[in-house]
Amino acid sequence: MKFKELKEKVKEYDYGKLFSSKAFLIGGCVIMIVAAIIVNALLPTPANVTETPDESESGKILGNSVLVDTNGEAEGENAQATEETDNYFTVATVNREKSRNEAMDVLQTIADNPEALADAKEQALLDISKLVSEMNAETNIESLVNAKGFEQCVAIVSDKQASVIVKSDELKAGEVAQILEIVYLETGILPENTKVIQK
């Protein structure tokens, strides 16, 4: 008997209220953003930025100058390393923009939905504003870091944390301090919540 009653309740339930509820919309938005970040993290990149350069089998360090005979093998290796680094920055920028655009689309859909609750729309608009602010901060950080003499830079700002990846053979303590200061002045994010990574 209880099963039949439960079955009838399931059939009679107004699912329109569930799908337009604030909790459902915000939960769906959060799930979409997290899924976009996970997909972005799982995409293959040319190299892992958190690792230091490994020594190759021949004992050479990738990116360092090596004296060789006239066949030019070291020049070819350096050119390949430079190309891989340049590709890394291009891929990182594209992946960042892709995940941000996906999150923005989800939030805009909620904000534009006439059936969404007022609270859900308001939260979506606040999240859109936050994303735009983070994107502007990233652009400003990259421009200012480039002005300090770094050829390439990718900044990622999210939830009071920042990561700045710069193209450099060796970051000096003064350069790291300059980058941390730029991030702090642009975002208010403290140095302990900022990662500076050389690539």
Image: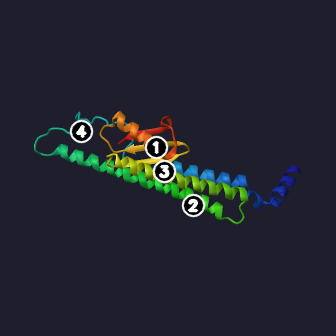
Q: Is residue 112 left or right of residue 73?
A: right
| N-term-proximal mark, 1 vs 2 | 2
**How far is mark 2 from mark 4, CA to CA?**
44 Å
Q: Is residue 14 left or right of residue 83?
A: right
Nearest the viewer among 141 and 92 is: 141
Q: In terms of secondary structure, where does tag 2 sit? A: helix
Identify the colour scheme used.
Answer: rainbow
**How far is mark 1 from mark 3, CA to CA?**
8 Å
- What crowding class fits label 3: few (fewer than 14 Cα within 10 Å), some (14-19), or many (20 or more)? some
Residue under numbered circle 4: 64
Instruction: Say which of marks 2 and 3 sits in front.
Output: 3
Q: Is residue 27 visible?
A: yes
Please, what is the three-letter code of the amino acid marked with disc 2? Answer: Asp
Residue under numbered circle 3: 137
Q: Position of residue 104 (x, y in %)?
A: 56, 58
Residue under numbered circle 1: 183
Residue under numbered circle 2: 105
- What crowding class fits label 2: few (fewer than 14 Cα within 10 Å), some (14-19), or many (20 or more)? some
- What crowding class fits label 1: few (fewer than 14 Cα within 10 Å), some (14-19), or many (20 or more)? many
| N-term-proximal mark, 1 vs 3 | 3
**How far is mark 1 from mark 4, CA to CA?**
30 Å
Query: Is the Cβ of the residue at disc 3 closer than 8 Å to that at disc 4?
Result: no
Q: Is residue 19 visible?
A: no
Which residue is situated farthest in the left direction here? Answer: 70
Determine the residue positioned at 47% across, 39% down.
Answer: 194
Q: Position of residue 31 (x, y in %)?
A: 61, 51
Please, what is the three-letter code of the amino acid marked with disc 4? Answer: Asn
